[in-house]
Amino acid sequence: MKVVFMGTPDFAVPSLQKIVESGLDVVGIVTRPDKPRGRGQKLQPTEVKAAAQDLGLDVPILQPESLKDKGFLADLKALKADLFAVVAFLILPRNVLAIPPLGSVNVHPSLLPKYRGAAPIQWAIIKGETETGVTIFRLSPRVDAGDVLIQEPVAIGADETAGELYERLKGVGAELLVRAIDGVARGAVTPIPQSDDGVTRAPKLEKDDGQIVWTEGATDIRNLIRGVNPFPGAFTRWQGQVLKVHRASVVAGSGKPGMVMGVDGKTGLCVATGQGALVLDEVQPAGKKRMSGADFVRGYPVKMGEMLGHVDL
C-alpha cells in the first residue's frame, strides 16, 4: 500500500508517526509552504514537514502554494500512491481526489455528521457536549460529508478544555487512521453513508467568539471559557481593559449580570451571570501573565459591585 500523507499542524503529527510505525509505504508528503516565524521571522517548516524529517523519510515533500497548480498535480500523480491519508489539511479539489485508486481518507475529531467544519473540538465543548469522538471517512467533494469508515466515541471531561481534548483526540485519530487504512487495503471495511439528519456545524472561531456575554447562564459561559481555551480565549472588560478568563467554576448566586458579587483573597472573585454565578479561577490581566483569581484580587483593586462587561473589538 503506497500512501501520500497530507497534513500541516501538530494535530497531524501522531498520525504520520503511526503510519510510518505500521510499515505502510509512505511515498510522499504534502504540507503547506514554510512560513516566517519568531522574532527573526526566519522560514520555519510546518510541524508535519519537521516530523517527516525527524522520522528520516527520504520522500518528496510537496509544498504547493495552490492545490490547483499544474506542476504540483503532475508531481503528485508521479508518486503513484494507492491512497491519500489526510489530517488537518486543506479542502482537496476534485482533480486531486480523483488521483488515488483507493481514494482519500480523513481524520475528523467529531462523531460525524455532528460538528462538520474547522473547529469541531471547540464547538463540542462550547455546546456542553459530554461526548465527542473521532471519525475516519472517505473524502468527497462535499466538506466533511463523505462515507464513514470508522468512528470511536470519546468522553469529554467535566473540566476539560479544548486544548486538553485536542491533545487526546490527535492520538485517538492516529490509531483509528491506521486501522482504517489497513481495512481499506484488505477490503475489510464497509463505508457507511452519512445521514443528513443530525448535521451540525463547527465554523472557524474568530477572536470575538471568545467574548463573554454575562447575561447568559453560568454553565453556558463556563462551557465557552473551556471551549475557547487556549484559542481564541475567553475575555471580558474590567476597569476599561481586557481581562482574559482561562478557567471558572459555577456557584450559586444571583445579581445583575456582570456584577462582582464577591472578592476573596483565597477564592478569587465571584461574578453574577444571567443564571447563577461564576468564580473566576484563572485570569490574565492585560499585558500580564496568567494568575489565579485569588492572586488577581490580592494584587489588583477589584471592588464589590463593579461591573465586568462588553469589549469593543
Image: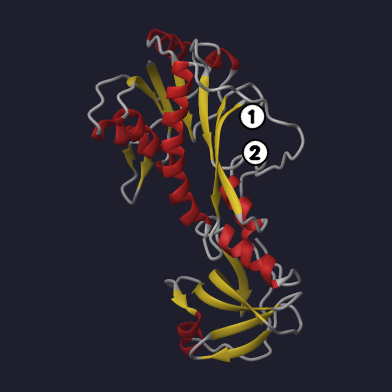
Q: Which residue is mark 2?
A: 116
Residue at disc 2, secondary structure: loop
Find residue 219 and report its horizontal and vertical position in percent. 67, 69
> Which class describes the residues within 10 Å of circle 2: few (<14), some (14-19), or many (20+)?
many
> Which class describes the residues within 10 Å of circle 1: few (<14), some (14-19), or many (20+)?
few
Q: Residue furthest front?
A: 188
Q: Earlier in the sequence, mark 2 or mark 1?
A: 2
Is the C terminus in the top left, top right, bottom left or bottom right quadrant? bottom right
Q: Residue furthest left?
A: 56
Closer to us: 310 or 224: 224
In the picture, residue 46 is in which quadrant?
top left
Q: Whole-Å distance between the Cαs marked 2 and 1?
A: 8 Å
Q: Is residue 135 above or below residue 40?
A: above
In the picture, residue 35 is in which quadrant?
top left
Residue at 42%, 37% (x, y): give it.
Answer: 174
Amino acid at the residue labelled 2: Arg
Q: Which residue is mark 1?
A: 143
Residue at disc 1, secondary structure: loop
> Is any atom of residue 237 visible in this view?
yes
Amino acid at the residue labelled 1: Val
